[in-house]
Image: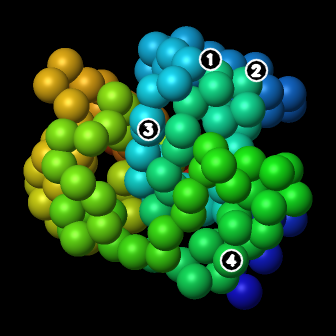
Amino acid sequence: KQTDNFLKVYGEVIQAFRTTDVSKLLDYQIEQMGLKKGQRVLDAGCGVGGPATYFAKKAEVKVEGITISEVQAEKAREKVKEMKLSRKVKITEGDFHHLHEYYESDSFDTVYFLESFGHAIDHQEVIHSAWGMLKPGGTLYIKDLFIKEAALASLEKDIKKGNHQHQ
């Protein structure tokens, strides 16, 4: 049910605070991550596969996506099939806290979290898990929402009010 609500609001790219043209956001992320043709990347918390399929097509990378949601995994697999990307994108239903149970160590050029890291139960465990998947010199990329902390106690109330408006 929650997945359907997210899809209504965000479409297939479940990320907040973005441009109206989602491809601009995804192109920016390709550039920031330094994705290059032929690389193997891991989409940790891949949702319904919007970014994974876009990156596979546009950056010509091989993407492994993992999501803990059975519903999202199924929707992502359908999208991969529709877009004829089954040779480039593989979706696994699983827990990104324990990536070693699904993938080989030191086997990814990039591991990325696009607004999925915040859902982790144990952030340190997730970082350790992701780090173990990276090839030497690989990239760990995390894009997420964070709560602003007030530099001055007097601003705390306004910041909390502003944060609440975006939740």
Question: Residue 49 at what x, y percent from top left?
Answer: 66, 55
Would you call the spot at circle 1 few (<14 residues within 10 Å), some (14-19), or many (20 or more)?
A: few
Amino acid bearing label 3: Val
C-alpha distance separating marks 3 and 1: 16 Å
Which mark, residue 28? 1
- Measuring 64% from the left and 22% from the top, which residue is drawn there? 59
* Mark 1: amino acid: Tyr
Q: Bin the neighbour count of mark 4 within 10 Å (Cα to Cα): few under 14, some 14-19, many 20 and up.
A: some
Q: Secondary structure at mark 2?
A: helix
The three-letter amino acid code for the residue at tag 2 is Lys
Q: Which mark is residue 93?
A: none
Taking the spot 27% from the left edge, 41% from the top edge, the residue there is 107
The residue singled out by tag 3 in the image is 41
- Amino acid marked by disc 4: Glu
80 in relation to 143, above or below: below
Residue 57 sits in quarter: top right
Quadrant housing the C terminus:
bottom right
> Nearer the viewer's eye, disc 2 or disc 4?
4
Residue named by callout 2: 24
The quadrant in which residue 47 appears is: bottom right
In the picture provided, is 25 more to the left or to the right than 113? right
Residue 66 versus residue 3 in the image, above or below:
above
Nearer the viewer's eye, disc 4 or disc 1? 4
Residue in the image at 70% along x and 67% along y: 77
| Callout 1 secondary element | helix
Mark 3 vs 1, N-terminal side? 1
In this figure, which residue is indicated by the disc labeled 4?
74
